[in-house]
Amino acid sequence: MVARADLRRHWRATVAVALLVALVGGVTLAALAGARRSASSLRRFQEESRSSDFQFEVSASTPAQLAKLRRSPGVIGVGVADLLLVGPASATFRHIQIAAAVDRTLGTEVDRPRVVAGRLANPDAVDEINIGEGLSRIAHLGVGDVLDTKSMSPKGFAALQHGAPFRLDGPQPRLHIVGIIRRPLDLASLGTAGGVVLMTPAFDRTYRKRIVNVSGYTLRVRASDRRLANRSIQQIFGKDPAFLPQSLTSESSGARDAINVLTDVLLLFAAIAAIAGTVAIAIVLSRELASTRMNQETLAALGISRVQRATMSGARVLVIAVGGAVLAVVGAIAASPHLPFGVARRADPDPGLHADWFVLGLGTIALVAIVLLIASVEALHSTRLARRAVRDQRVTFGARMSATVGGAGLSPAATAGLRMAAEPGRAERAVPVRSAVFGVAFGSVGVCALLVFASSLGQLSSTPRHYGWGFDFRAESTGDQSCSHRDDGGASKVPGVGSVGIVCYAPMQFAGHPTIGWELLPVKGRLGPVIVEGRAPQTAHEVALGATTLHALDKQIGDVVRTRVTKGRVVTERIVGQAVFPQFDEAQPLAEGVWLTMRGWFAAGATEDQSSRELVGSYAPGADRAAVVRRVASLRGYDAAKGPAAPTEIDRLTKIDWFPTGTAALLAVLALIAVTHAIASSTRRRRRDLAILQTIGFERQQVRRTVEWQATALAVGGLAVGVPLGIVAGVAVWRAIAESLGVRATTSLPVELLLVAPVTIVAVTLIASIPGRSVSRHHPAASLHAE
């Protein structure tokens, strides 16, 4: 009977608390389900598209060799492409890669694309192609447009080998774009730069003898067992003079790193929402259920046992727990079409409405259990108060504080307000002092952590050295590609240039792992790789690896690795550092690669015919940078100088600017709910004390100030705990994100941290002014009539 009466009497508050439970649970469950879908999105996309696990070049591949490879253990798909020297006629996007499928296996058996718009190209059509989203965006091409190309004939290539000028004298096919496609490689840096355009088998048959084949064939292999497949590839094609394994890291590393970061962000968002939401629910629910405390002695006198008194709020609690959990599940399912987001959404093979019953099931149980646990603790606390004997009056902490601040010369309103903040009271006059402090503390922890995260991310994206640029500019070599000489075209003599070096990078097999080998040859001044931990290599037997490479090899700084190079020779190197790598025109992962000295680079098997050569340099102090760029552009043998560009991993991370804002807003709302409820409850229960103050001469304005001083004291207590913990939490979160990217974890503390305390105090004071104004209008006799 009491439970029914209690539910009827407080049904509005019951609905409000249930909605709070639904809000917290829905946000948390949606974020957790989105994180799970994000984490598996790339793997599911690769399975759907039958992505390759290996890529290598050979001078020739016979039908017998391909048949043997397809029958080999661990191999489940093989695709072959012809490397014809053909490219877009426009120089605006000349860095894209174009190949021609030899047969229909490439695009069906291996590397099957997802159609975004239009349709797949007809394999028997010579002039039909599909392009990726990256090329469509940078070239402003769509379905129905035409891509003009140029090529070099075998005759023109032979003339080039004998010193003739470079001239594209071959056929100039006009290719009709019939579809926009997406493959896993389009999600990484390679796709951002334009990706790979694959011609049809009909194009290859038509132009194979009219357009020069510069490098032979590229084979793409899908494996069920990478170790067995790699062994089969080495046995069948290892003796080919042009055999060159190539790393596929650039096709997935950037996307994988970005998706990992997005997953971590969603998990972090869910954790923050769950913790802050639990605190808010505990504050509000315990205050709502605490209204039964004043009736405990009466109910006990009527013969109601302690167990019955502890469970008489069960109806309200069940409505709050079950109703809130059901609404949370509905909200999480309704939010599922919006998650995952970013690159993970592009990778997800099946975006749309989803119900992750694993997360929803466990989350519902946890949500109901949390509400019941909070209610049980409050019920036991309420009934235990009824059994306490009336204690003798003693000097409380609030009384001691009142005497202290009164002696310090503070106003009567300040003295009374500080005492009310420090004295929680007993029985029906108990006020939620700790609840208000906890609400402010958790809110400030989250906001401070997010400010540190956002500031550190901004510093990373605006500091090129942090993402591999140990120099200010680069210029691509258009002449001699030799990496063993110091010819800088006169860059070291350009006024305003402080340091100059030559960077070469090439694909290589390092300790059996396909990666990119880098070396930097200083010409003037001191330039070197960007080292995250340890030091740069100094001898031919020392290397610095990226974080991804270290993880792939299961190595750490100080370990020794052995690399098998030509003719069975084994090179031994010691890992002396962890490096981060710059991203040039070609797709280069941020944390995948190996830095070596020049001698070590050649010793590890790098070849100049497969390498790229770049001039790099730094500005002298006070130099006119625009003038330096113009002068470098005029150097013989080098392209125009270019400045640093943030790698894809960091660029995608900066696009989640909703995270700090959205999380801070959520925490602010939850903290506001908790603090508002706590202050309102405190004012309502302290109405007798405030009435006594009015009877001894307090005016309305002093009563309002008393409530405001109480709220300010509670806010300061929460800030004293929350701000330091928030900074520590922000530093820890940023370090985890930086380590996942493979960059140095440099933390930035923003000046906005100085605003957290004053803004919080002002907000809490404004909140307190509302109930303060209301209680100041009450006549003291009305509040004291029952005394």
Image: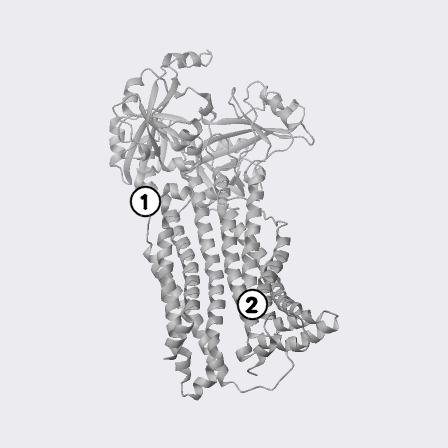
Spot occupied by residue 208 in the image (x, y as percentages of width and height):
31, 19
Spot occupied by residue 356 in the image (x, y as percentages of width and height):
33, 54
Q: Is residue 443 above or below residue 56?
A: below
Quarter-of-image position of residue 616:
top right
User: In the displayed structure, does residue 708 sit left or right of residue 290?
Assistant: right
Q: Can residue 86 be seen in this view?
A: yes
Name the mark on residue 679.
Answer: 2
Measuring 27% from the left and 34% from the top, which residue is drawn there?
108
Q: Nearer the viewer, residue 562 or 392?
A: 392
**In contact (CB < 8 Å): disc 2 and disc 1:** no
- Crowd rating for badge 2 (residues with CA inside 10 Å; few <14, some 14–19, many 20+): many
Marks 2 and 1, Cα distance to the nearest angstrom? 47 Å
Amino acid type for the residue under numbered disc 1: Asp
Q: Can residue 569 be seen in this view?
A: no
Spot occupied by residue 243 in the image (x, y as percentages of width and height):
37, 28
Total marks in image: 2
User: What residue is shown with label 1?
Assistant: 350
Amino acid type for the residue under numbered disc 2: Ile
- Crowd rating for badge 1 (residues with CA inside 10 Å; few <14, some 14–19, many 20+): some
Q: Which of 73 and 407 is in front in this view?
A: 407
